[in-house]
Amino acid sequence: MKKNLIVEKSYEFALKIINFYKELPKEYKSLYNQILRSWTSIGANVTEWDNAQSKKDFLSKMWISYKEANETRYRLKLFKDSDIWNQYMIVELLKDIEEIIKILSRITKTTKESLKRN
């Protein structure tokens, strides 16, 4: 089976987010429950690409992932700048999400162009 870069990257990112979450002190965990769902939803939407009913449906799923990734970047930047928790881990997560955003941006742009031609 052919490997899909964005599926792999988003899955690896979700695992890192889960590990980040597990290391948080208990007093912060209630603040991050919703955020954890948001962060891991990037990969959940990306994995739906294979079940897309059309190119428009595919684009919709990728666009949702792209928006979630941008929201994730924003929240990670807030955490980094607030010095709440492990700065090294947050910086690494920021690098990962930047890469995911670039990939999703290329996918959505290419798909939009393809839809315009048809």
Image: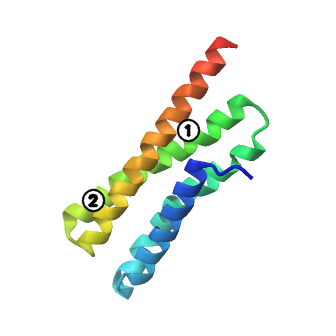
Relative to residue 42, is residue 34 depicted above or below? below
User: Which of 100 and 82 lies nearest the eye of the viewer?
Assistant: 100
Which of the 4 image quarters holds residue 53?
A: top right
Which residue is located at x 77 percent, y 45 percent?
51
Q: Is residue 112 left or right of residue 66?
A: right
Front position among marks 2 and 1: 1
Number of callouts in the render?
2
Q: In this view, does 84 lie to the left or right of 14?
A: left
Which residue is located at x 59 percent, y 40 percent?
62
Q: Is residue 35 left or right of residue 83?
A: right
Of all residues shown, which one is farthest toward the front? 1
Which residue is located at x 45 percent, y 82 percent?
22
Residue type at tag 2: Leu
Whether tag 2 and tag 1 are in contact, CB under 8 A, the answer is no
Relative to residue 60, is residue 6 depicted above or below? below
Which label was assigned to residue 78?
2
For label 2, the SS is helix
Which residue is located at x 71 percent, y 35 percent?
57
Residue type at tag 1: Trp
Q: Position of residue 13 (x, y in %)?
A: 48, 62
How would you rate the neighbour count of disc 2 (Cα within 10 Å): few for under 14, some for 14-19, many for 20 or more? few
- Which image quarter holds the C terminus? top right
Return the residue at label 1.
Answer: 63
Q: Which of marks 2 and 1 is nearer the N terminus?
A: 1
User: Which of 99 and 52 lies nearest the eye of the viewer?
Assistant: 99
